[in-house]
Image (spheres, grey):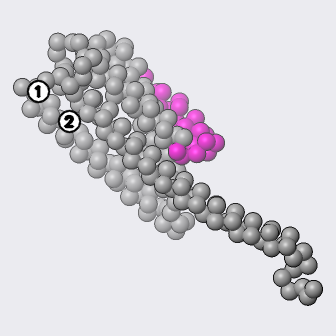
Amino acid sequence: MVPAAVASAVFGRRGGRLTDLKGNSFVVYVASSLLLACFILLSTFTGGSPLFIAVFLILGNVGQSFIVIALSNSVSRTLPKEQVGVGMGILAMVNFISQGIAIGVYSKIVDLGSQGIPNWNPFYSYSSGFIFSNICFVLAALQLVILAIYNLSVGREKQKKTLVLKESEAAVYSIVITKRQNPKGPCAVA
């Protein structure tokens, strides 16, 4: 956990700069890719060397910090100035509550054990610990679903912006065409 926390601290500032340079969507896709890689690798090598696990957790922690940066930036840019503080507070509260719920769910799954549950990752080759492999496998699938929903949401947003842009371009073109047909202006007398 310590190497992952250090990596998050080091790359956190770079994630903020990357968000400012490339935008929130780019950072969300990078973060989702890192989280997806982390979950798939953890699902495959859960019973492996602790050094591998440390490297995989670095990917996950950096991805998590990048996604928090992008979400915080989105909230602060989306809300009006007088509501930014409340919005950031609600975001922090939702993150805190969801982390608590997730810990409870993971603990209950581990308590129930792996009685009668097969290993869902076909690449997992260790004899024990496949309940953790299954948890990470489900997290990878959930990350794919989250990424698909985000992609659909951003895609619709881009389509709306493109439609608005096309409408404004049409208005500009109609003004230009009108000017060319009647260079003296609409009120000019021939």
* Residue 161 visible: yes
The kind of secondary structure element at disc 2 is helix
Q: Nearer the viewer, residue 129 or 116?
A: 116
Residue under circle 1?
117
Tell me what residue is drawn at x 24 percent, y 19 percent. Answer: 122
Specify the amino acid type for callout 2. Tyr
- Residue at the spot x=31%, y=23% of the render? 42
When asked about the image quadrant of residue 163, the answer is bottom right
Residue at 29% in and 47% down: 98
For residue 185, the mark is none
Q: Which residues are magenta?
A: 1-25
Please count the marks in the image.
Answer: 2
Q: In this rendered view, identify the residue nearer to me: 167 or 2.
A: 167
Residue 113 horizontal/vertical position (percent): 10, 28
* Type of amino acid under label 1: Ile
Asked whether residue 13 is drawn in magenta, I would say yes
The front one of 190 and 186 is: 190
Q: Residues within 10 Å of mark 1 (few under 14, many from 20)?
A: few
Please determine whether, in this image, residue 92 is positioned above or below residue 31.
below
Residue 189 lies, in percent from the top left, at: 91, 88
Is residue 154 found left or right of 127 in the rendered image? right
Quadrant containing the N terminus is top left
Q: Could you classify mark 2 by the number of other residues whose Cα lies within 10 Å: few (under 14), some (14-19), or many (20 or more)? A: few
SS majority, magenta: helix
Q: Is residue 119 above or below residue 151?
A: above
Q: Which residue: 39% across, 52% down?
A: 92
Label 1 SS: loop
**Residue linked to disc 2:** 106
Left or right: where 42 falls relative to 120: right
